[in-house]
Every structure is written in C-alpha cells, then in structure tokens.
Amino acid sequence: MIDRTDALEDFTPYLMNRIIARYNKGVEDALAEAGVSVAQMRALAVLAQGGPCTVNELSVLTVIKQSTLSRTLDSMEAAGLIRRVAETGDSRFRRIHLTDAGRAAHDRAWPAMTTMRDTMLSALDPQDRETLNTMLMRIFYDIRHHDF
C-alpha cells in the first residue's frame, strides 16, 4: 500500500480541513455541555459580535447553508435565543436579533470556543498565532465572494 499521507499533508486545503474537523469535534462536545449546537453557537457568536443581520448575511458569516440555517434559527427562536423582526416597509425581509437569553447562552458557551482555540494553537507562541491569523486573513480577503 502506498503512503499518501505526506502528499495530502502538503496540500494546504486538506490540512486546514482536517484541523478544523478536529477543532469542531472538540467544540461540539464542549458546547453540548452548555446546551447549544455548533450551528447555534456560530449564529450566536455572529449576532453577539456584529448585531442583527439578515438570514442571507448570517448564512455567509456562519458558513452554514441557508436551508440548514433556517432550521437552526427555527429551533433557536423556539428556545427564545433569537427573534426575527420584519424590515420596515418590506415584511419579506427579516433581521435576526439576539435576545437576552441568546446573549446569556453565548456568554455561557463562548469559553468552550476559546478553550478549544487555545488547545488547537497550543504549539504556537503568541507571535506565531498573530502571524498565522494575519496570513489567514489575507487568504480570506482574497478568496471571499461577499463584502462581509
């Protein structure tokens, strides 16, 4: 059998996907203890940091397909974590708002995110972390398809 691991590990997208898959699994387990899913946490984090937004904007920022996100938002609304507010003048468009309960869920779950981030990046010193983030932001801004 041919060992293809080295070749794959030289393929940056493959390596990034493997890293994020491991990160997401660790986060998933930690967030379950806080009572939120990974998809819910992504939405909570975007809304907590950026304020209300449309479903389309939230889909882009959370990297969740709109159909999946709509189901996630339905469960979050039923749990009282978010509320959908119709835009003035056009009821077809709604902005998603974080409720006080949603803010509390975010604040309760966010430490799991930072703990997993620190675990993932433990091999890097602070300067390496800053360099990595700077490089990733350059790639992100070069490859993105949206203005946000």
Image (cartoon, helix red, strand yellow):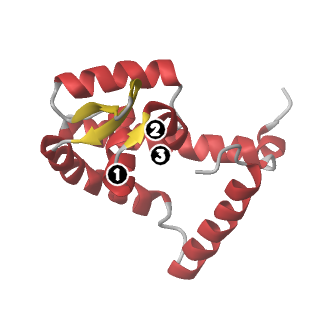
Q: Is residue 83 above or below residue 129?
A: above
> Quarter of the image containing the N terminus?
top right
First reached walking from the N terminus: tag 2 or tag 3: 3
Give x and y (percent) for residue 35.
19, 34
- Check disc 1: other Cα within 10 Å, few if <14, some if 14-19, many if 20+: few
**Mark 1 secondary-structure assignment:** loop
Query: Distance of mark 1 from mark 3, alpha carbons?
Result: 25 Å
Rendered position, 66 above or below 41 = above
The percent position of residue 24, horizontal first and vertical second, equals: 45, 40
Which badge, 1 or 3, comes first in the chain's sequence? 3
Amino acid of disc 3: Tyr
Name the foreground residue: 87 vs 128: 87
Mark 1 vs mark 3: give the one in front. 1
The numbered mark at residue 23 is 3
Label 2 packing within 10 angstroms: few (<14), some (14-19), many (20+):
many
Residue drawn at (45%, 20%), measured in percent from left and top? 68
Residue 58, label in figure: 2
The answer to the question of whether label 1 and label 3 lie on touching residues, with beta carbons closer than 8 A, is no
Looking at the rendered structure, which numbered label has been put on residue 72?
none
Check disc 1 and give the amino acid type: Gly
Q: Residue at x 63, y 41 (%)?
A: 17
The residue at the point 51 percent across, 79 percent down is: 126
| Residue 9 located left or right of residue 66 | right
Instruction: Give x and y (percent) for residue 86.
Output: 32, 29
Q: Position of residue 141 (x, y in %)?
A: 70, 57
What amino acid is at disc 2? Leu
Q: Residue furthest front?
A: 89
Does 69 sit left or right of 63 as displayed? left
Q: Secondary structure at mark 3?
A: helix
